[in-house]
Image (cartoon, helix red, strand yellow):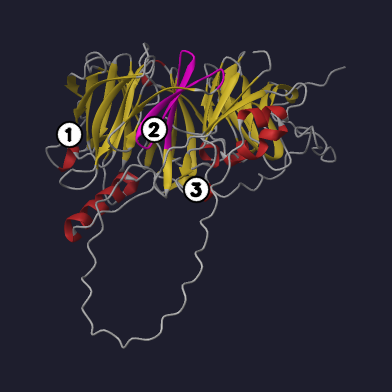
Protein backbone atom coordinates (compact mmCIF):
# COMPACT_ATOMS: atom_id res chain seq x y z
CA UNK A 1 0.00 0.00 0.00
CA UNK A 2 1.63 3.28 -1.03
CA UNK A 3 2.31 5.72 1.75
CA UNK A 4 0.60 9.12 1.60
CA UNK A 5 2.86 11.90 0.38
CA UNK A 6 3.94 14.55 2.88
CA UNK A 7 4.43 18.26 2.14
CA UNK A 8 8.07 18.06 3.21
CA UNK A 9 10.05 14.87 2.86
CA UNK A 10 11.02 13.32 6.21
CA UNK A 11 12.78 10.03 5.32
CA UNK A 12 14.94 8.15 7.85
CA UNK A 13 18.21 9.97 8.50
CA UNK A 14 20.37 6.94 7.69
CA UNK A 15 19.47 7.24 3.99
CA UNK A 16 22.11 9.76 3.03
CA UNK A 17 22.81 11.14 -0.45
CA UNK A 18 25.21 9.02 -2.44
CA UNK A 19 27.20 9.81 -5.58
CA UNK A 20 24.90 9.83 -8.56
CA UNK A 21 21.84 10.25 -6.34
CA UNK A 22 22.17 13.57 -4.52
CA UNK A 23 18.46 13.62 -3.75
CA UNK A 24 18.32 10.36 -1.83
CA UNK A 25 16.12 10.71 1.22
CA UNK A 26 17.40 12.39 4.34
CA UNK A 27 15.92 13.78 7.50
CA UNK A 28 14.69 17.35 7.79
CA UNK A 29 16.99 18.80 10.39
CA UNK A 30 18.04 22.36 11.05
CA UNK A 31 18.61 24.56 7.99
CA UNK A 32 21.86 23.86 6.19
CA UNK A 33 24.66 26.40 6.47
CA UNK A 34 24.46 28.78 3.49
CA UNK A 35 27.49 29.74 1.41
CA UNK A 36 29.06 33.14 1.66
CA UNK A 37 26.42 35.73 0.81
CA UNK A 38 26.78 37.40 -2.54
CA UNK A 39 27.60 41.03 -2.44
CA UNK A 40 24.67 43.29 -3.18
CA UNK A 41 25.16 46.15 -5.60
CA UNK A 42 21.95 48.08 -5.07
CA UNK A 43 22.22 51.40 -3.24
CA UNK A 44 19.38 52.15 -0.81
CA UNK A 45 17.66 55.48 -1.30
CA UNK A 46 18.70 56.99 2.02
CA UNK A 47 22.30 55.91 1.46
CA UNK A 48 22.21 57.55 -1.95
CA UNK A 49 20.99 60.77 -0.34
CA UNK A 50 23.89 60.66 2.12
CA UNK A 51 26.34 60.21 -0.74
CA UNK A 52 24.82 63.19 -2.53
CA UNK A 53 25.36 65.32 0.57
CA UNK A 54 28.97 64.18 0.69
CA UNK A 55 29.38 65.02 -2.97
CA UNK A 56 28.01 68.49 -2.44
CA UNK A 57 30.28 69.04 0.53
CA UNK A 58 33.50 67.63 -0.81
CA UNK A 59 33.16 67.66 -4.56
CA UNK A 60 34.24 64.00 -4.80
CA UNK A 61 32.56 61.22 -6.78
CA UNK A 62 32.05 57.73 -5.35
CA UNK A 63 32.24 54.62 -7.50
CA UNK A 64 30.01 51.72 -6.52
CA UNK A 65 30.49 48.23 -7.98
CA UNK A 66 27.57 47.03 -10.07
CA UNK A 67 27.39 49.62 -12.84
CA UNK A 68 24.95 52.03 -11.16
CA UNK A 69 27.54 54.61 -10.20
CA UNK A 70 30.56 55.96 -11.96
CA UNK A 71 33.23 58.48 -11.19
CA UNK A 72 35.22 61.21 -12.79
CA UNK A 73 38.95 61.09 -12.93
CA UNK A 74 40.73 61.21 -9.60
CA UNK A 75 42.19 64.57 -8.54
CA UNK A 76 45.61 65.24 -9.97
CA UNK A 77 48.47 64.39 -7.67
CA UNK A 78 50.49 67.30 -6.32
CA UNK A 79 53.40 68.22 -8.58
CA UNK A 80 56.68 66.74 -7.42
CA UNK A 81 59.23 69.24 -6.20
CA UNK A 82 62.52 69.49 -8.02
CA UNK A 83 65.49 68.22 -6.06
CA UNK A 84 69.21 68.65 -6.69
CA UNK A 85 70.66 65.80 -8.73
CA UNK A 86 72.31 63.11 -6.66
CA UNK A 87 75.98 62.33 -7.19
CA UNK A 88 76.49 59.90 -10.01
CA UNK A 89 77.04 56.31 -8.91
CA UNK A 90 77.59 53.21 -10.97
CA UNK A 91 74.18 51.90 -12.00
CA UNK A 92 73.21 48.34 -11.21
CA UNK A 93 72.55 46.01 -14.12
CA UNK A 94 68.86 45.99 -15.09
CA UNK A 95 66.80 43.26 -13.51
CA UNK A 96 65.32 40.70 -15.83
CA UNK A 97 61.76 41.57 -16.81
CA UNK A 98 59.06 39.60 -15.02
CA UNK A 99 56.94 37.82 -17.62
CA UNK A 100 53.29 38.83 -17.68
CA UNK A 101 50.92 36.15 -16.43
CA UNK A 102 49.29 34.09 -19.14
CA UNK A 103 45.60 34.80 -19.79
CA UNK A 104 43.31 32.10 -18.45
CA UNK A 105 42.24 29.70 -21.19
CA UNK A 106 38.55 28.93 -21.75
CA UNK A 107 37.70 25.46 -23.11
CA UNK A 108 35.99 25.34 -26.50
CA UNK A 109 32.57 23.87 -27.19
CA UNK A 110 34.23 21.01 -29.08
CA UNK A 111 36.46 20.19 -26.11
CA UNK A 112 33.51 20.11 -23.71
CA UNK A 113 31.41 17.95 -26.03
CA UNK A 114 34.33 15.58 -26.62
CA UNK A 115 34.08 14.61 -22.95
CA UNK A 116 30.35 13.85 -23.09
CA UNK A 117 29.03 10.48 -22.05
CA UNK A 118 25.92 8.84 -23.55
CA UNK A 119 22.78 10.51 -22.23
CA UNK A 120 24.53 13.73 -21.22
CA UNK A 121 23.53 17.08 -22.67
CA UNK A 122 25.29 18.78 -25.54
CA UNK A 123 26.87 22.13 -24.77
CA UNK A 124 28.25 25.28 -26.28
CA UNK A 125 30.36 27.94 -24.62
CA UNK A 126 31.07 31.58 -25.48
CA UNK A 127 34.53 32.99 -24.85
CA UNK A 128 34.13 36.74 -25.32
CA UNK A 129 37.49 38.36 -26.24
CA UNK A 130 36.28 41.90 -25.45
CA UNK A 131 39.00 43.99 -23.81
CA UNK A 132 37.47 45.07 -20.50
CA UNK A 133 38.67 47.42 -17.75
CA UNK A 134 40.63 45.58 -15.07
CA UNK A 135 37.74 45.39 -12.61
CA UNK A 136 34.43 43.61 -12.12
CA UNK A 137 31.94 44.19 -14.95
CA UNK A 138 28.21 43.62 -14.55
CA UNK A 139 26.33 41.38 -16.98
CA UNK A 140 22.72 42.46 -17.48
CA UNK A 141 19.39 40.73 -18.11
CA UNK A 142 19.09 37.88 -20.61
CA UNK A 143 16.55 38.27 -23.44
CA UNK A 144 15.48 35.34 -25.61
CA UNK A 145 14.05 36.56 -28.92
CA UNK A 146 13.45 34.18 -31.82
CA UNK A 147 16.43 31.86 -32.13
CA UNK A 148 18.84 34.15 -30.25
CA UNK A 149 19.76 34.99 -26.68
CA UNK A 150 20.83 38.60 -26.14
CA UNK A 151 22.70 40.31 -23.31
CA UNK A 152 24.31 43.67 -22.59
CA UNK A 153 27.81 43.83 -21.15
CA UNK A 154 29.92 46.95 -20.68
CA UNK A 155 29.75 48.93 -23.94
CA UNK A 156 27.87 46.57 -26.22
CA UNK A 157 24.74 44.46 -26.66
CA UNK A 158 25.34 41.07 -28.31
CA UNK A 159 23.09 38.33 -29.70
CA UNK A 160 24.14 34.67 -29.80
CA UNK A 161 22.45 31.87 -31.74
CA UNK A 162 20.68 29.46 -29.40
CA UNK A 163 21.59 26.37 -31.40
CA UNK A 164 25.37 26.78 -31.31
CA UNK A 165 26.33 30.00 -29.46
CA UNK A 166 27.66 31.75 -32.57
CA UNK A 167 27.56 35.55 -32.46
CA UNK A 168 24.75 36.85 -34.69
CA UNK A 169 25.12 40.60 -34.19
CA UNK A 170 26.55 43.16 -31.80
CA UNK A 171 25.62 46.81 -31.19
CA UNK A 172 28.48 48.94 -29.79
CA UNK A 173 27.66 51.80 -27.43
CA UNK A 174 29.62 54.96 -26.53
CA UNK A 175 29.72 54.15 -22.81
CA UNK A 176 28.94 51.36 -20.35
CA UNK A 177 25.39 50.07 -19.99
CA UNK A 178 24.02 50.88 -16.54
CA UNK A 179 20.40 49.64 -16.70
CA UNK A 180 18.28 47.18 -18.68
CA UNK A 181 14.61 46.14 -18.41
CA UNK A 182 13.76 42.49 -17.72
CA UNK A 183 11.26 42.23 -20.60
CA UNK A 184 11.44 43.38 -24.23
CA UNK A 185 8.34 44.45 -26.15
CA UNK A 186 6.19 41.70 -27.72
CA UNK A 187 7.82 42.45 -31.09
CA UNK A 188 11.34 42.17 -29.69
CA UNK A 189 12.45 45.74 -29.03
CA UNK A 190 14.27 46.91 -25.94
CA UNK A 191 15.65 50.15 -24.53
CA UNK A 192 18.97 50.05 -22.70
CA UNK A 193 20.39 52.90 -20.63
CA UNK A 194 24.06 53.76 -20.79
CA UNK A 195 26.22 56.27 -18.98
CA UNK A 196 27.09 59.82 -19.93
CA UNK A 197 30.58 60.20 -18.52
CA UNK A 198 30.78 63.78 -19.83
CA UNK A 199 27.96 65.01 -17.58
CA UNK A 200 28.71 68.17 -15.61
CA UNK A 201 28.08 66.51 -12.26
CA UNK A 202 29.93 63.26 -12.96
CA UNK A 203 28.71 60.03 -14.49
CA UNK A 204 24.99 59.84 -15.11
CA UNK A 205 22.86 56.86 -16.17
CA UNK A 206 20.81 58.91 -18.61
CA UNK A 207 21.31 57.85 -22.24
CA UNK A 208 18.40 55.84 -23.70
CA UNK A 209 19.07 53.64 -26.74
CA UNK A 210 16.40 51.55 -28.47
CA UNK A 211 17.56 48.31 -30.12
CA UNK A 212 15.56 45.87 -32.25
CA UNK A 213 16.62 42.50 -30.84
CA UNK A 214 15.35 40.62 -33.90
CA UNK A 215 17.60 42.48 -36.35
CA UNK A 216 20.35 44.01 -34.22
CA UNK A 217 19.52 47.47 -35.54
CA UNK A 218 19.91 50.46 -33.24
CA UNK A 219 16.96 52.85 -33.31
CA UNK A 220 16.25 56.16 -31.60
CA UNK A 221 18.41 57.65 -28.87
CA UNK A 222 17.58 60.33 -26.31
CA UNK A 223 18.84 61.74 -23.03
CA UNK A 224 16.82 61.76 -19.83
CA UNK A 225 16.11 65.31 -18.68
CA UNK A 226 17.26 66.43 -15.23
CA UNK A 227 15.73 69.55 -13.71
CA UNK A 228 16.53 69.24 -10.02
CA UNK A 229 17.59 66.89 -7.25
CA UNK A 230 14.34 64.88 -7.39
CA UNK A 231 14.94 63.63 -10.94
CA UNK A 232 18.68 63.00 -10.95
CA UNK A 233 19.95 60.03 -12.95
CA UNK A 234 22.51 58.59 -10.57
CA UNK A 235 20.16 55.64 -10.03
CA UNK A 236 17.72 54.66 -12.79
CA UNK A 237 15.28 51.73 -13.08
CA UNK A 238 13.33 50.70 -16.18
CA UNK A 239 10.59 48.27 -17.20
CA UNK A 240 8.69 47.55 -20.42
CA UNK A 241 5.00 46.64 -20.67
CA UNK A 242 3.56 46.36 -24.16
CA UNK A 243 5.12 49.18 -26.20
CA UNK A 244 5.69 51.40 -23.16
CA UNK A 245 8.95 52.01 -21.32
CA UNK A 246 8.61 53.18 -17.72
CA UNK A 247 11.61 54.97 -16.21
CA UNK A 248 12.22 55.83 -12.57
CA UNK A 249 14.98 58.42 -12.15
CA UNK A 250 15.71 59.72 -8.70
CA UNK A 251 12.28 60.25 -7.13
CA UNK A 252 10.25 60.77 -10.31
CA UNK A 253 8.91 58.48 -13.04
CA UNK A 254 7.75 58.85 -16.65
CA UNK A 255 6.58 56.69 -19.55
CA UNK A 256 7.91 56.63 -23.13
CA UNK A 257 6.79 54.90 -26.31
CA UNK A 258 9.36 52.25 -27.22
CA UNK A 259 8.62 52.54 -30.94
CA UNK A 260 9.78 56.15 -31.35
CA UNK A 261 10.95 57.42 -27.94
CA UNK A 262 8.08 59.87 -27.48
CA UNK A 263 7.44 60.82 -23.86
CA UNK A 264 3.85 59.83 -23.09
CA UNK A 265 3.17 61.03 -19.55
CA UNK A 266 4.61 61.57 -16.11
CA UNK A 267 3.69 58.76 -13.75
CA UNK A 268 1.80 60.59 -11.01
CA UNK A 269 3.00 60.69 -7.43
CA UNK A 270 0.72 59.51 -4.64
CA UNK A 271 0.47 61.88 -1.68
CA UNK A 272 2.92 64.42 -3.16
CA UNK A 273 5.70 65.11 -0.72
CA UNK A 274 5.13 61.81 1.08
CA UNK A 275 5.46 59.06 -1.58
CA UNK A 276 8.15 58.89 -4.27
CA UNK A 277 8.52 56.32 -7.10
CA UNK A 278 11.26 53.85 -6.33
CA UNK A 279 11.16 51.09 -8.98
CA UNK A 280 9.08 49.59 -11.79
CA UNK A 281 8.16 46.06 -12.89
CA UNK A 282 7.00 45.16 -16.39
CA UNK A 283 5.66 42.36 -18.56
CA UNK A 284 1.91 41.68 -18.91
CA UNK A 285 1.29 44.38 -16.28
CA UNK A 286 3.07 47.61 -15.34
CA UNK A 287 3.64 47.99 -11.60
CA UNK A 288 5.15 51.03 -9.89
CA UNK A 289 6.61 50.84 -6.38
CA UNK A 290 6.91 53.96 -4.22
CA UNK A 291 8.60 54.67 -0.90
CA UNK A 292 6.41 56.62 1.50
CA UNK A 293 6.90 58.50 4.78
CA UNK A 294 10.66 58.47 4.32
CA UNK A 295 12.42 59.67 7.43
CA UNK A 296 14.63 58.82 10.36
CA UNK A 297 11.89 56.72 11.96
CA UNK A 298 11.79 53.64 9.74
CA UNK A 299 8.96 52.15 11.77
CA UNK A 300 6.59 54.66 10.13
CA UNK A 301 7.72 54.26 6.52
CA UNK A 302 5.87 52.00 4.08
CA UNK A 303 5.63 51.09 0.39
CA UNK A 304 2.85 51.69 -2.09
CA UNK A 305 2.49 49.37 -5.10
CA UNK A 306 0.27 50.47 -7.99
CA UNK A 307 -0.81 48.88 -11.25
CA UNK A 308 -0.66 51.50 -14.01
CA UNK A 309 -2.35 51.29 -17.41
CA UNK A 310 0.74 51.56 -19.63
CA UNK A 311 -1.20 53.35 -22.40
CA UNK A 312 -2.81 56.07 -20.28
CA UNK A 313 -1.10 56.14 -16.88
CA UNK A 314 -4.40 55.48 -15.12
CA UNK A 315 -4.07 53.74 -11.75
CA UNK A 316 -5.99 50.44 -11.63
CA UNK A 317 -5.35 49.57 -7.97
CA UNK A 318 -3.11 50.27 -4.99
CA UNK A 319 -1.56 48.00 -2.38
CA UNK A 320 0.02 49.44 0.75
CA UNK A 321 2.37 47.55 3.03
CA UNK A 322 2.01 47.86 6.77
CA UNK A 323 4.08 50.54 8.50
CA UNK A 324 7.70 49.54 8.98
CA UNK A 325 7.66 47.25 5.91
CA UNK A 326 8.61 47.85 2.28
CA UNK A 327 8.25 46.12 -1.08
CA UNK A 328 11.33 44.05 -1.84
CA UNK A 329 11.02 42.15 -5.13
CA UNK A 330 8.24 41.49 -7.60
CA UNK A 331 8.37 37.77 -8.42
CA UNK A 332 5.47 37.87 -10.88
CA UNK A 333 3.14 40.51 -12.31
CA UNK A 334 0.46 38.01 -13.44
CA UNK A 335 -0.47 36.87 -10.85
CA UNK A 336 1.03 39.58 -8.66
CA UNK A 337 3.47 37.98 -6.21
CA UNK A 338 6.03 40.04 -4.32
CA UNK A 339 8.26 40.04 -1.28
CA UNK A 340 8.05 42.46 1.62
CA UNK A 341 10.87 43.37 3.99
CA UNK A 342 10.96 44.57 7.58
CA UNK A 343 12.80 47.91 7.35
CA UNK A 344 14.44 47.17 10.70
CA UNK A 345 15.79 43.80 9.47
CA UNK A 346 15.72 43.67 5.68
CA UNK A 347 17.93 40.57 5.51
CA UNK A 348 16.38 38.37 8.16
CA UNK A 349 12.69 39.30 8.29
CA UNK A 350 10.85 38.92 5.00
CA UNK A 351 7.61 37.50 3.59
CA UNK A 352 6.13 36.41 0.27
CA UNK A 353 2.84 38.15 -0.52
CA UNK A 354 0.30 37.15 -3.18
CA UNK A 355 -2.29 39.68 -4.33
CA UNK A 356 -5.68 38.95 -5.84
CA UNK A 357 -8.07 40.94 -7.98
CA UNK A 358 -7.88 44.68 -7.47
CA UNK A 359 -4.59 44.41 -5.58
CA UNK A 360 -6.28 42.87 -2.53
CA UNK A 361 -4.16 40.78 -0.18
CA UNK A 362 -4.58 37.08 -0.97
CA UNK A 363 -1.99 35.21 1.11
CA UNK A 364 1.13 35.91 3.13
CA UNK A 365 3.82 33.21 3.22
CA UNK A 366 6.68 32.90 5.70
CA UNK A 367 9.26 30.49 4.24
CA UNK A 368 11.89 31.13 6.91
CA UNK A 369 10.86 28.35 9.33
CA UNK A 370 11.86 25.79 6.67
CA UNK A 371 15.27 27.40 6.33
CA UNK A 372 14.76 29.30 3.08
CA UNK A 373 16.81 32.46 2.60
CA UNK A 374 15.79 35.63 0.80
CA UNK A 375 16.14 35.35 -2.99
CA UNK A 376 17.93 32.03 -2.71
CA UNK A 377 20.46 33.53 -0.27
CA UNK A 378 21.56 36.17 -2.79
CA UNK A 379 20.25 39.00 -0.62
CA UNK A 380 18.98 41.99 -2.56
CA UNK A 381 20.85 40.63 -5.61
CA UNK A 382 21.97 44.14 -6.53
CA UNK A 383 19.54 44.65 -9.40
CA UNK A 384 16.05 45.93 -10.05
CA UNK A 385 12.81 44.94 -8.44
CA UNK A 386 12.28 41.93 -10.77
CA UNK A 387 15.68 40.32 -10.19
CA UNK A 388 15.44 37.71 -7.42
CA UNK A 389 17.56 34.58 -7.96
CA UNK A 390 16.17 31.46 -6.33
CA UNK A 391 12.46 32.40 -6.41
CA UNK A 392 9.92 31.87 -9.20
CA UNK A 393 6.16 32.39 -9.02
CA UNK A 394 3.72 30.56 -11.27
CA UNK A 395 -0.04 30.52 -11.58
CA UNK A 396 -0.54 28.13 -8.66
CA UNK A 397 2.54 28.25 -6.45
CA UNK A 398 5.67 30.17 -5.57
CA UNK A 399 8.81 28.06 -5.84
CA UNK A 400 11.66 28.85 -3.46
CA UNK A 401 15.20 27.50 -3.78
CA UNK A 402 18.68 28.17 -2.52
CA UNK A 403 21.39 26.25 -0.74
CA UNK A 404 20.50 22.64 -0.05
CA UNK A 405 16.75 22.79 -0.57
CA UNK A 406 13.84 23.70 -2.81
CA UNK A 407 10.10 23.77 -2.25
CA UNK A 408 6.73 25.11 -3.35
CA UNK A 409 4.07 27.07 -1.45
CA UNK A 410 0.44 27.20 -2.59
CA UNK A 411 -0.57 30.75 -3.52
CA UNK A 412 -4.17 30.17 -2.45
CA UNK A 413 -3.51 28.70 1.01
CA UNK A 414 0.06 29.76 1.75
CA UNK A 415 0.88 26.19 2.78
CA UNK A 416 3.96 24.20 1.80
CA UNK A 417 3.01 21.78 -0.98
CA UNK A 418 6.30 19.95 -1.28
CA UNK A 419 9.93 20.32 -0.31
CA UNK A 420 13.22 18.55 -0.98
CA UNK A 421 16.55 18.80 0.81
CA UNK A 422 19.86 18.01 -0.87
CA UNK A 423 22.98 18.70 1.15
CA UNK A 424 25.62 20.66 -0.74
CA UNK A 425 23.44 21.48 -3.75
CA UNK A 426 22.36 24.89 -4.97
CA UNK A 427 18.86 24.65 -6.44
CA UNK A 428 17.23 27.34 -8.60
CA UNK A 429 13.59 26.97 -9.69
CA UNK A 430 13.25 27.78 -13.40
CA UNK A 431 9.51 27.65 -13.98
CA UNK A 432 6.27 26.06 -12.85
CA UNK A 433 4.94 22.98 -14.64
CA UNK A 434 1.69 21.02 -14.33
CA UNK A 435 0.14 22.67 -11.31
CA UNK A 436 2.64 23.05 -8.50
CA UNK A 437 5.46 20.99 -10.06
CA UNK A 438 8.64 22.80 -11.06
CA UNK A 439 11.70 22.51 -13.24
CA UNK A 440 14.76 23.13 -11.06
CA UNK A 441 18.33 23.90 -12.08
CA UNK A 442 20.90 22.16 -9.91
CA UNK A 443 24.13 24.11 -10.22
CA UNK A 444 27.33 22.15 -10.73
CA UNK A 445 29.79 21.92 -7.88
CA UNK A 446 33.08 20.12 -7.21
CA UNK A 447 32.32 16.42 -7.54
CA UNK A 448 28.84 16.86 -9.00
CA UNK A 449 27.60 17.73 -12.49
CA UNK A 450 24.87 20.29 -12.99
CA UNK A 451 21.51 19.54 -14.54
CA UNK A 452 17.78 20.12 -14.62
CA UNK A 453 15.38 18.16 -12.41
CA UNK A 454 11.60 18.05 -12.17
CA UNK A 455 9.94 17.90 -8.74
CA UNK A 456 6.29 17.93 -7.76
CA UNK A 457 3.89 17.12 -4.92
CA UNK A 458 5.47 14.17 -3.16
CA UNK A 459 8.89 15.83 -3.19
CA UNK A 460 11.86 13.54 -3.64
CA UNK A 461 9.67 10.63 -4.76
CA UNK A 462 8.72 12.60 -7.88
CA UNK A 463 12.28 13.44 -8.91
CA UNK A 464 12.97 13.14 -12.63
CA UNK A 465 16.31 14.01 -14.22
CA UNK A 466 15.36 16.10 -17.26
CA UNK A 467 18.88 17.07 -18.31
CA UNK A 468 22.31 15.97 -17.07
CA UNK A 469 25.18 18.27 -17.95
CA UNK A 470 28.51 16.71 -19.00
CA UNK A 471 31.27 16.34 -16.44
CA UNK A 472 33.68 18.04 -18.85
CA UNK A 473 31.68 21.28 -18.45
CA UNK A 474 31.74 21.21 -14.65
CA UNK A 475 34.57 23.75 -14.00
CA UNK A 476 33.27 26.24 -16.57
CA UNK A 477 29.69 25.96 -15.36
CA UNK A 478 30.61 26.12 -11.67
CA UNK A 479 32.62 29.33 -12.16
CA UNK A 480 29.44 31.12 -13.29
CA UNK A 481 27.71 30.58 -9.92
CA UNK A 482 24.30 30.50 -11.66
CA UNK A 483 24.43 34.27 -12.06
CA UNK A 484 21.87 34.67 -14.87
CA UNK A 485 19.57 31.90 -16.10
CA UNK A 486 17.24 31.56 -19.08
CA UNK A 487 15.29 28.43 -20.02
CA UNK A 488 13.52 27.98 -23.36
CA UNK A 489 12.38 24.89 -25.29
CA UNK A 490 14.41 22.47 -23.20
CA UNK A 491 17.61 24.55 -23.35
CA UNK A 492 19.20 26.38 -20.44
CA UNK A 493 21.52 29.36 -20.88
CA UNK A 494 23.79 30.35 -17.99
CA UNK A 495 26.00 33.40 -17.54
CA UNK A 496 27.81 34.85 -14.55
CA UNK A 497 26.37 38.00 -13.04
CA UNK A 498 29.82 39.62 -12.98
CA UNK A 499 32.96 39.05 -15.04
CA UNK A 500 36.48 40.22 -14.33
CA UNK A 501 38.40 42.39 -16.74
CA UNK A 502 41.69 40.87 -15.56
CA UNK A 503 43.13 38.34 -18.01
CA UNK A 504 44.24 36.01 -15.22
CA UNK A 505 40.69 35.87 -13.84
CA UNK A 506 38.81 35.40 -17.10
CA UNK A 507 35.87 33.03 -17.21
CA UNK A 508 33.54 32.00 -20.01
CA UNK A 509 30.93 34.60 -20.92
CA UNK A 510 28.08 32.14 -21.46
CA UNK A 511 27.36 28.40 -21.50
CA UNK A 512 24.29 26.51 -22.68
CA UNK A 513 23.01 22.93 -22.44
CA UNK A 514 20.30 21.07 -24.35
CA UNK A 515 19.30 17.45 -24.98
CA UNK A 516 21.35 15.66 -27.64
CA UNK A 517 18.33 15.67 -29.94
CA UNK A 518 16.20 18.63 -28.79
Task: Provide the secondary structure element on which disc 3 rests.
Answer: helix
* Magenta-colored segment: predominant secondary structure: strand
Which quadrant of the rendered structure holds the N terminus? top right
Viewer-proximal residue among 302 and 508: 508
- Range covered by the magenta-colored residues: 139-164
Task: Provide the secondary structure element on which disc 1 rests.
Answer: loop
**Quarter of the image holding residue 124?**
top right
Which residue occupies 16% across, 43% down? 229
Q: Earlier in the sequence, mark 3 or mark 1?
A: 1
**Residue of label 2:** 385
- Eye-nearest disc, 3 or 1: 3
Task: Provide the secondary structure element on which disc 2 rests.
Answer: loop
Relative to 288, residue 481 above or below: below
Residue 164 visible to the viewer: yes
Residue 483 shown left or right of residue 64 in the figure: right
Disc on res. 503: 3
Relative to 18, residue 355 above or below: above
**Residue of label 1:** 272
Do the residues bearing badges 1 and 2 touch, measured as CB atoms within 8 Å?
Answer: no
For the residues labelled 3 and 1, the Cα–Cα distance comes to 50 Å
Amino acid sequence: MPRPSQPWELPPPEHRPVPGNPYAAEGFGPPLEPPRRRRSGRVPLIAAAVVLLLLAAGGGVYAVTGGRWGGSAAPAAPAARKTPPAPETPSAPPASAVPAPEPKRIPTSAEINAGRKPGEATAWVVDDPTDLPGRSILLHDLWVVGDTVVQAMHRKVTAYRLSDGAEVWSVPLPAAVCETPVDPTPDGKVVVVYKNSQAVHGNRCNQLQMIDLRTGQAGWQRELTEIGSLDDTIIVHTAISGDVLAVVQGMTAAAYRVGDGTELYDIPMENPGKCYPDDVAGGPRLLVSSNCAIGADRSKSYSLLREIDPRTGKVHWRFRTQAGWKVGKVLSVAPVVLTTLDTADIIGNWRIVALGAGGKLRTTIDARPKGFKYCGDSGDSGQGIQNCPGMVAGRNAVHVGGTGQVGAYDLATGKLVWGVKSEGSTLHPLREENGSSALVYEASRPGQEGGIIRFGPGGVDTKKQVLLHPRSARPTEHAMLAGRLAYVNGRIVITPSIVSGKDTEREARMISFAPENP
